[in-house]
Image: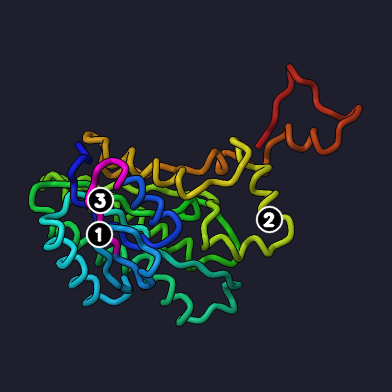
Amino acid sequence: MELEGAAALVTGGASGIGAATVGALQAEGCRVAVLDREPGAAKADVVIECDVAEEEQVVDAVAAARDHLGGLDVAVLSAGVGGGMPLIDMTTQEWDRVHAVNLRGVFVSLRESAKAMTSGGSIVTVASVSAFTTERWIAHYSASKAGVVALTRTAARELGPSGIRVNAVAPGVTDTPMFAQSKTLPGFAEQVVSRTALGRLGTADDLAEAVIGLCRMDWVTGQVLIADGGLTRWSPLDPLEASEREPGPERPAAEGGRTGR
């Protein structure tokens, strides 16, 4: 897709991955509309206050963005919330709070964006590696992001005949405002870095670059691009990691051995 002059919409575009994506789209020559519940910091051609958990607000905001931009070619659905709580203590209210934004909000935003794309286009959802990994205390978040993956794949099949491509980017641990609370967990950030092949936390700009890439790929739809610096390549069953923790005479031979799993 040629992004120069394209009309783009970004939900959650006032901060984090969304804000970085807005900047990246503008650098490509796009005209951009931001939909955000707290739009004060947003920098775009048009900024619309919108809570994606509220269907009527999304319907009206997408229509307003389309009218202001003269159409819609790109939609990046990055609005999301997090939270942490043991499963047995989790209330249905907490479950619904996360799903209302992360899954229902993406569904409504995707539906309305697709309706506004009269000449094809590109939709990129923001999922998470948590859709595929097993992490305690974020059952609601993981389930919502797994739903986004399934929604993305189904939407790609349904909307393909209309020339609309639908893909997802799945961030790993990314240094954004949503990650700020995790920094209070002793040693958490350092542990993540140690298990990331590229040796650092992700940045919002890293994810924006992945989004731009998906927007450009005309022959790619229904795919999930995991952008995590190699974090999910770490395995707790790695025999070399065990040998590195306890070097000495018991260290396994470098050649000739086999590992059973």
Mark before the other along the chain sequence, 2 or 1: 1
Image coordinates for residue 6, horizontal then vertical, percent: 18, 46
Up/down of 58 relative to 175, above or below? below
Q: Nearer the viewer, mark 1 or mark 3?
A: 1
- Residue that appears at 80% across and 21% down: 253
Mark before the other along the chain sequence, 1 or 3: 1
Q: Position of 243 compared to 62: left or right?
A: right
Magenta stretch bounds: 26-34
Give the alpha-carbon distance from disc 1 to disc 3, as whole Å.
Answer: 14 Å
- Residue that appears at 68% across and 33% down: 260
Name the element at disc 2.
Answer: helix
Q: Which mark is residue 47?
A: none
- Residue that appears at 52% across and 57% down: 176
Mark before the other along the chain sequence, 2 or 3: 3
Q: Which mark is residue 33?
A: 1
Pointer 3 residue:
123
Q: Quadrant of the N terminus?
A: top left
Q: Residues within 10 Å of mark 3 (few under 14, many from 20)?
A: many
Name the element at disc 1.
Answer: strand
Q: Residues within 10 Å of mark 1 (few under 14, many from 20)?
A: many
